């Protein structure tokens, strides 16, 4: 049960980070690029490993 909560917490943090970063971008193409970057990092399933996501805006 604890592992499931950790996965959900990581996913929640990742989505909040992605949304925050997207809000700072003005160009739709840049937001789309960032979306696809996060989509690739997160994988297709909750059971996929979350790869290292930058903590600072690039």
Image: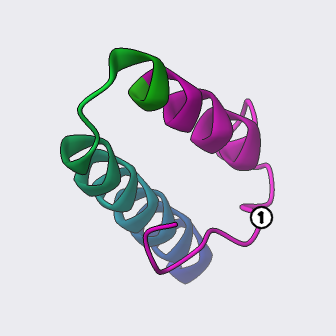
Q: Secondary structure at mark 1?
A: loop
Left or right placement of residue 39 versus residue 2 in this view:
right
Left or right? Give the position of 1 relative to 15: right
Residue at 62% x, 28% y: name it: 36
Classify mark 1: residues with Cα within 10 Å, few (<14), some (14-19) or many (20+).
few
Judged left or right of residue 1, residue 13 is: left
Asked if residue 41 lies in the magenta stretch, the reply is: yes
Residue 38 sits above or below residue 10 on the image: above
x, y percent for residue 57: 43, 69
Give the residue displayed 28% in from the left and 46% down from the top.
19
Up the image or down, 52 lies above or below 48; here it is: below
Residue 16: quadrant of the picture: bottom left
Q: Is residue 24 magenta?
A: no
Of all residues, the one furthest to the front in this rendering is 27
Nearer-the-camera pick, 50 or 36: 36
Which scheme is used to colour this image of the protein? rainbow
Q: Nearer the viewer, residue 58 or 45?
A: 58
Residue at coordinates 46% horizontally, 29% vertically from top-left?
30
Query: As rendered, which of 58 and 49 lies closer to the eye?
Result: 58
- Residue 14, position in %: x, y? 45, 60
Residue visible at 56% across and 66% down in the picture: 7
Q: Between 58 and 20, which is closer to the camera in this rendering?
A: 58
Q: Position of residue 50 (x, y in %)?
A: 72, 61
Which residue bears the numbered disc 1?
51
Q: Position of residue 9 (x, y in %)?
A: 40, 70
Q: How many marks?
A: 1
* Chain part drawn in magenta: 32-58
């Amino acid at each position: 049960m604890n592992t499931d909560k950790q996965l959900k917490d990581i996913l929640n943090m990742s989505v909040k980070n992605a949304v925050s970063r997207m809000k700072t971008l003005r160009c739709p193409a840049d937001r789309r690029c960032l979306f696809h970057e996060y989509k690739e990092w997160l994988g297709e399933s909750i059971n996929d490993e979350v790869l290292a996501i930058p903590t600072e805006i690039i």
